[in-house]
Amino acid sequence: MKKLLVAVLTAATFMATAQEAPKVTSAIIALRGNELVEAKGFIDEATAIIDGKNQAEIKEKIMSKYHYNKALIYSKIAASPEAEIKALAPDANDIAAQSLLDLILFEKNAKKQPYTEDAQRESQTIAYNYLVEAGSAYEAGDYEAAYQGYMNAFELKKNELLGEFAYLDTSLLFNAGIIAGSAGDLESSSAAFAECLGLGYKGITFTATDVLGNPKQYPNKAALDKAIEGGLATDPVIGEDVRPSIYISLINNAKKLEKTDDYNKWLTEARAAYPENKDLLDIQLQSFLDVKDYDGAMKNLDEAIAKNPDKGIYHFVKGNILQTEMKDLDAALVEYKAALEKDPEMSDAMYMCGLVYIDRANAITEQMNSLGLNETRKYNALKDKQKEVFGESLQYFEKSYEMNPQDMDIVRALMEVYRKVGDYQKSMDMKAVLDEAGE
């Protein structure tokens, strides 16, 4: 009787220690038959058993099979085109990724590593699943989920447990930054872009036309050159460095988040790295104007003019600062005329030339008002001079009106100037234009 009891207890112990093995085996058989519902059921049962035991008691071979095949099962569920299958586990790809890493970590300390290399290779499939999910989420307008998908793929690919298959795919991080921005998550967007810069991401693409006439992208310039030299491709095209656009995103995000230190940091760093970039130059100019740092703005404008000799807009902005902030009307007029030389159709520059003369006339008015009652002769002389100045402004306002007859500020200026020079009919004509426009 005692022997029988011992035999029964021994059998019970064996069943308790070995019951995970048949579940794993059944899961593997179901997986091979692509019976994912059954495979998931068996592997989940194995999980429940294994989680409830001292795992040191489980055979290494069984644990390796368990982790690896759990990853495969959940990866297939995540990649399934059938909604019913995908619904079995909405987080299937996360489970697959974790199981894969658990397998590699487990075998790292095991006597044998039967599945490590296969698992490292399989990581590419799971990363791809994340990107497919991210693409679907993006198309559906779920930018938060799309961002998370790209980040999951990025984090998985760079995991050092993947050995030689580990890859720092900064393009995924770059796309995550763009998508986070679309989602309105400026903090995450900035974090992704900042990491891109820290990792040296340039985003330069290398493409060419293959022997079949189709466009093909190459991983680097060396691969592109090799294809061209070997006659396997033609018409090579090297894309532009995208880092200036990354800086611009960081600068704009910092401004929206009202992070002044970050704004100044990224702008200063960007201008130093890309001094020839017009967009960054313009952003810095606007930053000076926003805080009324006109000395900084003038230095920036001189730099912009030197680097963009054919652009009239910088002369125009410089003239505006000289006129409105520094009260140097002569210098302002020089800049407005320079703007018109570069861009003869710039009606705003033409209009501002007229305003320079208005400011000069207003200065004469101040002189007239400062005269005493017995200085009639000086008063009349100044009045005649003022009328001449108003007359000089007309040529600019009239040309500006020809360029842009819809601008009511020009019409108002003409109405006033015509009145000042005594041409009352034309002044009334301009008033009629204003009345018709409801101004």
Image: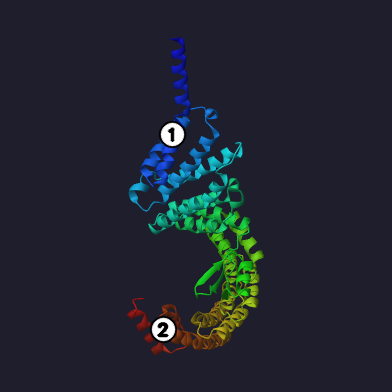
From the viewer's perspective, is residue 308 above or below residue 181? below
Residue of label 2 = 405
Could you say where residue 32 lies in the image, as x and y percent from the top left? Answer: 42, 46
SS state under label 1: helix
109 left or right, relative to 69:
right
Question: Residue 84: image x %, image y %?
Answer: 33, 48
Residue 22's label in the rendered image is: 1
Q: Residue at x 54, y 41 (%)?
A: 103
Instruction: Quadrant for residue 203, please give it.
Output: bottom right
Quarter of the C terminus within the rendering: bottom left
In this picture, is 281 found above or below 251? below
Q: Determine crowd level at label 2: few under 14, some 14-19, many 20+ residues with C-alpha closer than 10 A.
A: some
> Badge 1 local density, few (<14 within 10 Å), some, or many (20+)?
few
Q: Which amino acid type is marked by label 2? A: Pro
Could you say which is closer to the camera, residue 270 or residue 395? 270
Mark 2 or 1: in front is: 1
